[in-house]
Amino acid sequence: MRERTPLFLMANLGSEVSQLFLHLEKGERERSMSVTVRAQKIIEELLAHPELRGKTKEVVAHGDEMRE
């Protein structure tokens, strides 16, 4: 399997966050939780990505926000 680039992962994370806000606005708690889980997996993959070593400050901040 081909490794996904940080740019690809960030684009997907942005899409998940957009969906999260949409579901929260509609009061769709179960769907928002599902999106949160997917976003967390993307954040974990970003944090482990070799191209981002030492450059994960923003990713960590977004992960903290997702947990709140």
Image: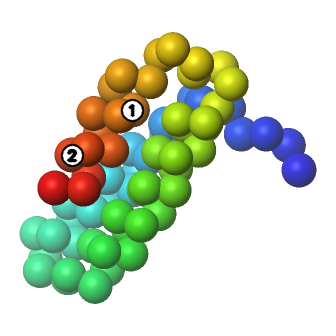
Residue contact between numbered discs 2 and 1, judged by CB atoms under 8 Å: no
Query: What residue do we see at 39% from left, 44% from top?
Result: 14
- Residue 21, above or below 34: above
- Residue 32 position by quadrant: bottom left
Quadrant housing the C terminus: bottom left
Does 48 sit left or right of 14 as displayed?
A: right
Q: Name the residue under label 2.
A: 65
Inspect this view and state whether residue 35 appears: yes
Going by the image, does 10 lie left or right of 1? Answer: left
Position of residue 63 relative to residue 20, above or below, is above
Q: Is residue 59 above or below residue 37?
A: above
Distance in Å between CA atoms under marks 2 and 1:
10 Å
> At 68% across and 25% down in the image, what residue appears?
50
Q: Report which residue position mark 1 lands on.
A: 59
Q: What amino acid is at disc 2?
A: Glu
Given residues 65 and 31, the one toward you in this image is: 65
Left or right for 17, reference 44: left
Q: Residue at x 47, y 16 (%)?
A: 55
User: Callout 2 environment at 10 Å: few (<14), some (14 to 19), or many (20+)?
Assistant: few
**Eyeballing the image, is 50 above or below 60?**
above
Point out residue 25 in the picture as x, y percentages from the top left corner: 11, 69
